[in-house]
Image: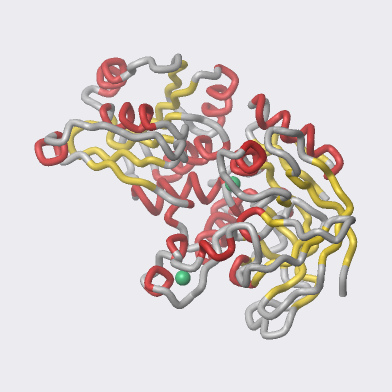
Amino acid sequence: MARKGKAVVARELNKPVVVEEITFDPPARGEVVVKIGAVGVCHSDLSGTNGTIALPLPLILGHEAAGMVIEVGEGVTELAVGDHVLANWIYMCGTCHYCNIGRPVLCDQQGKALFTMFDGTSRTRDASGAPLNVFSGVGVMAEFAVVHERNLVKYDPRVPADRAALVGCAVTTGVGAVLNTAKVRPGTTCGVWGTGGVGLNVIQGCAIAGAARIIAIDTSEAKLEFARTFGATDVIKTGPGEDLTKQIKKLTGGGLDYAFECVGSGEVAAAAYKAIRRGGLAVVVGVAPATASTTLVTRSLPFEEKTLTGSYFGSARPREDFPRMLALYAEGKLKLDELITRRYTIDQAPQAFADLESGVNARGVIVL
Ligand SMILES: [Zn+2]
Ligand SMILES: [Zn+2]
């Protein structure tokens, strides 16, 4: 059946988001309707409103949500009404080369569900009947969402929805970069540039991995305070373009074992690489502008066996990693409660985006 409900829509670039009453059409083959319980407000959503992530507008935002399946379409095999699910913003086809070798975040087919359903059509219409695009093929910043089952992961509903939702993006991106991509070893020294939602999760990932020392680097004093809560042992307040290589090498007695770039800057990626010691690994997690580039001294690769690599969505296997993150939370090893600094109603979405832009929250969550 078709449903009416509220959704948070980006209508015009660089304008506040709008909360609209829209129509959700019934699910097509392989799709389900999810009643959303909570949705995180992620920096990527903001990027969708200002063109940094260029998706065609009008666009329903949201890609980090928890909810419950209330209707299933034809041919749905993995989910049933009543299942609790987390949105997974990467469509995983299950049959391509990358899905077959256990690297589903690199799925060859994901490009087909960037702002529409996988089949290129839409299940969402505004009051005039015009189709609305959906962020990452999910568009879960709404009362309901029609989502393909390959964009969903079942979870244990004993974890409250607002906390579980965060596993769908920020937590898995950050903790996954540490545990899956870098495979940080106990007793090592890590540096983390940028302590927003993802950076804080890189920091707690390093703590979970048993790093002996975790150095957080940011331009904001307030964010560095959050960093300490999540396990940073040292914090460095920096200014734009400041070269910290010497300071970090002195502080660590030779350099970092692991460096994580969570800012999205070609220069910061170069700085992170410079700050690692012989045999060190620098991981770029942040998404830099398309024009950014990174320069390094080529012979440092063989002479010092240094590595520069990237991590996309924490190199995750969402169907295994989402439950694994929630298990770490249940064991008291993963901080989710502390991540949520403010909860909003869906009508307060414009405020939630303003707060995200000004950086006052670790994470803001819209609770429905
Ligand atoms: Zn996100
Ligand atoms: Zn695939």
In the picture provided, is 161 more to the left or to the right than 192? right
Q: Nearer the viewer, residue 300 or 192?
A: 300
Say which quarter of the image contains residue 212.
Answer: top left
Q: Nearer the viewer, residue 203 or 57?
A: 57
Up-down relation of residue 320 to residue 218 (above or below) = below
Q: Which residue is drawn at 82% across and 64% down?
A: 24
Tell me how many marks there are: 0
Q: Which residue is drawn at 33% across and 30% down?
A: 272
Percent from the top left, x then y, of residue 61?
70, 49
Q: Which residue is drawn at 68% across and 68% down?
A: 121
Up-down relation of residue 323 to residue 285 (above or below) = below
In the picture provided, is 245 more to the left or to the right than 368? left
Model colouring: secondary structure
In the picture provided, is 189 more to the left or to the right than 321? left
Q: Residue at x 72, y 84 (%)?
A: 74
Up-down relation of residue 346 to residue 86 (above or below) = above
In the rendered image, is residue 66 in sight?
yes
Percent from the top left, x then y, of residue 180?
39, 54
Q: Residue furthest bottom?
A: 75
Say which quarter of the image contains residue 161.
Answer: bottom right
Percent from the top left, x then y, of residue 284?
38, 40
Q: Which of 39 and 127 is in front in this view?
A: 127
Say which quarter of the image contains residue 132.
Answer: bottom right
In the rendered image, is residue 164 in sight?
no
Q: Residue furthest left?
A: 303
Up-down relation of residue 107 to residue 11 (above or below) = below
**Which quarter of the image is occupied by the N terminus?**
bottom right
Percent from the top left, x then y, of residue 220?
55, 19
